[in-house]
Image (cartoon, helix red, strand yellow):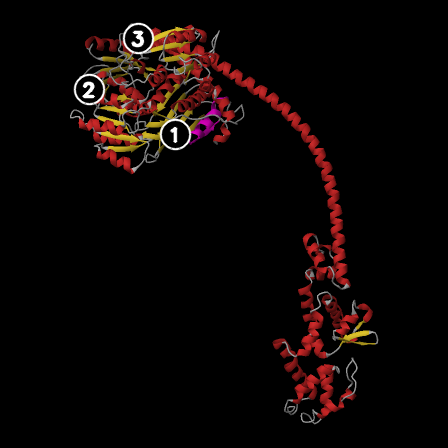
Amino acid sequence: MGKAIALEGIALENAAPLSKGLMSISSDPRRLLEAVFSWSNGQPFLTQKLCQIIAVQKSIPEGVDEVQWVEQIVRQHVVEDWESKDNPEHLRTIRDRVLLDPLHSTVVLSDYSKVLAGGSEGRPLKSLDDSSRLYLSGLIAIKQGRAYPRTKVYKTVFDRTWVDAQLSARRPYAEPMKRWEDNHDAQYLLSGEELQSSQQWAEGKHLPEADHRFLAASQALESQSFQRWNERLQEEVQQRRAAEKSLQEALKDLETAREHADLANRAKTDFLARVSHEVRTPINSVLGLSRLAMKQQTDELGRDYLQKIRRTTNYMLSVVNDIVDVAKVERGELSLNTETFYLDDVIDRLIDIVAPRALEKSLKFELDLPQDNLPLLLGDANRLEQLLLNLVSNSIRHTAEGSICLRITLSDPHNQEQPIHFAVEDSGEGVSDESVCGVVGNHPQSALKPGLGLSLCCELTGLMGGGLVVDSEPSKGSRFTATVRFGCVEREPDIEVLPQSILVCGLDAERTLVKELSQLGHQLSDSDCEADAPLDMVLFDGLDKTLLPAIKLLQSEHSELAFLAALPSGQSTPYHLSDFNYTTRLDYPLSRRALADLINHKGQAGAVAESDELIHFRGNYHVLVVDDDEINLLIVSELLTKTGLQVDLVDDGAKALDRLEQRQYDLVLMDIEMPVMGGLQAVEVLRKQPWGKDVPVVAMTAHALVGDGERFLAAGMNAHLTKPFEPQDLYGVLAHWLKIEEPLLSTNTPDTKSQKPTVLVVDDEPDNIRLMMSVLQEQYTVLAATNGEKALQLAASDKAPSAIILDVLMPGMSGFEVCKALKFDPATEQIPVIFVSGLDSEEHYREGLEMGAVDFLSKPVSPVLLLARLSKLL
């Protein structure tokens, strides 16, 4: 003791004084000290610490070897104590020397790892990156140019597991570096943000050579990648420049092609507009003149000729409409209108066009109706008619012999929307086996030859919420089934039937016509054309001339009977009937509603009054008609003058302006294309004059393309009426702009009409009045007023209504004020009042009922609900 101790530690022979302190523990203290030195390797502090720990022990258990016992003591009181309590302090000092130097800890740990890996042979100093700093940490001893772990304690506590964990905790790239060192695979090298952050971490630190190699290899790979990326970028830039050049050339070519396409489209649009205008104008004249002529023609043959003219002209009009509509489909402009209509009316108009065309090819045209009456629908009747016309026309075109049947099926009666299936079945040449709507318009020309019709049908069925399916076998015929959906106003409307006793001659009981008569409830008999029982009429086969002698004999004996000749629709009146004074002909097939009406009136001509004869203007109205077509002027003039209007005619816009300056007109009907001055130019001048700002001007033209109506409105027109038009279309425009207040519109005879309850509709919007009329006129006589004052006059007149449908918000007298006046007058206080309003509030509802109204309906009014409320009231 007291001698100087070298840094390398004390030798065993110099530690003899320590053995004296161990004599109480072991009989062989030197052997015990040797065991201590095997763990401390003479490190003074560690040797002293171990001796102190041993000295406090009582003694070595009997039979235990000193070396094993010392190892047990070291592991229990040094190694385990270090792991659990971070003691002794000497080990903390060694650890902190290594770890607390952030700039050198990595290289020290790396060098120490190499020394540990060298085992008992140690590691040459030249293989270490910083041996001096590792030596100063106290972890190693240097002998003959090689480094060894200084003590077994250090080697046990600071083993390779501990070193690897410390290196991994410090190196952000420990795992990829280890894998790269194993096989030098470039996939484990760093790149991008990972490389950049690792380089930032390494900056200023003294790192092992292995780290420098790894980071350098990563940087080299990154540089190579960057170089390759740069080369690719340069190549892409060159390619992009070439592509931009090609694109500019392509855009230039595209612009040229677009200009050519625009020119072609403009030419196409101009052509369609010209065709539409030039064809519609003479069609309007033909339809108008033939209509007027039929009113004057009493000869059956002459009426037959005129009817054929109208049918052919209507078919021409449908073709023109298809041409225009296909162009709308191409531009995505095809749309639907909404109106209330009877499906029966659509079917009758369709038969009127297609049945004669089927007859021309000696084809039998049949109509198969469902057991229930056809519904009253809400939708686009014209588009539905166009759809069915195209389907039936296609079947006629591809059927050489046999028959064509239109079969109507109603389904899902409880659905708010009424799905209807229209199946057109023929015995023609058939088509391919594809049956998807989207494919219908794309069949090979040899298989389907769809032309304009079927592709348009697909669009129409899609717009109406359904689809088109074709089922067919070549040479065995086809079935085209169109499914569409409509709003249902009345699912099974009643058909007025006056039961008749009918003698049926020459008509098979299985014929659809006979079955329909039986379905309507008429009493039918067949007794060889002999009147064995009281009869109302005789229905006979007009084509069977062998029946004529018996029919004539029957007529001579019963002249009071009505005699109806059943003939296929479109069939010319046979010669053998020319000298027979029968009542009228019954053209079949026809809708159940039309059949019932014809039988109810016993075939009397003119039983069904036309709508243009049921409207009359009560007022001194003056209308100016401007058209360069003399025939159109004649037709419109005759249609207007018989309604009580005073009409002036001129043939160009300049003359129209002269007339308008001279006197005031209530309405102007003006053609667009005219010599001297056209309609648009004339209305532009008119709107600049003080006397012409408020004159209603309605465009009356054959221009019917999308955008024409908007163009006319933008020029100053108030509305647009497309030629050719039906009289009721014209009268609807007049009713709007001349504000007719009492149009008694009904399709019944005066006797029948007077038996119906009368409903007064009061609304300041004529469109709302017309909508109400379309819903009500089948079951009620309808009066109309556009203000409260007129409503009170009608309610107190001899035409007092059975019920009043009253709008709440109107200029002048409001609906509430009208209701108060009605309930204050004893003559009108009992009339039920139903309020309608766009104000859906509980306050208005309560206020209306407190005034005495029986109901309050919100706009838009449900036709079904309105009819149900009126039915309950009346």
Position of the C terminus, as image quadrant, is: top left
Q: How many other residues sit within 10 Å of disc 1, few (<14), some (14-19) or many (≥20)?
A: some
Mark drawn on residue 749: none
Mark drawn on residue 577: 3
Position of the N terminus, as image quadrant, is: bottom right
Q: Amino acid at mark 2?
A: Ser
| Residue behind mark 1 | 421
* Residue at 22% in and 20% down: 793
The residue closer to the viewer here, 166 or 490, is 166
Q: Secondary structure at mark 3?
A: helix
Does residue 573 appear in the picture of this structure?
no
Q: Judge whether 751 appears above or below 212 on screen.
A: above
Determine whether label 3 and label 2 are within 8 Å by CB.
no
Which marked residue is nearer to the observer: mark 1 or mark 3? 1
Instruction: Give the magenta-colored segment's residue range.
Output: 450-473
* Residue at 34% in and 27% down: 377
Query: In the rendered image, which quarter is residue 529 located in?
Result: top left
- Sequence order check: which comes first, mark 3 or mark 2? 3
Residue 827: x %, y % from top left? 16, 24
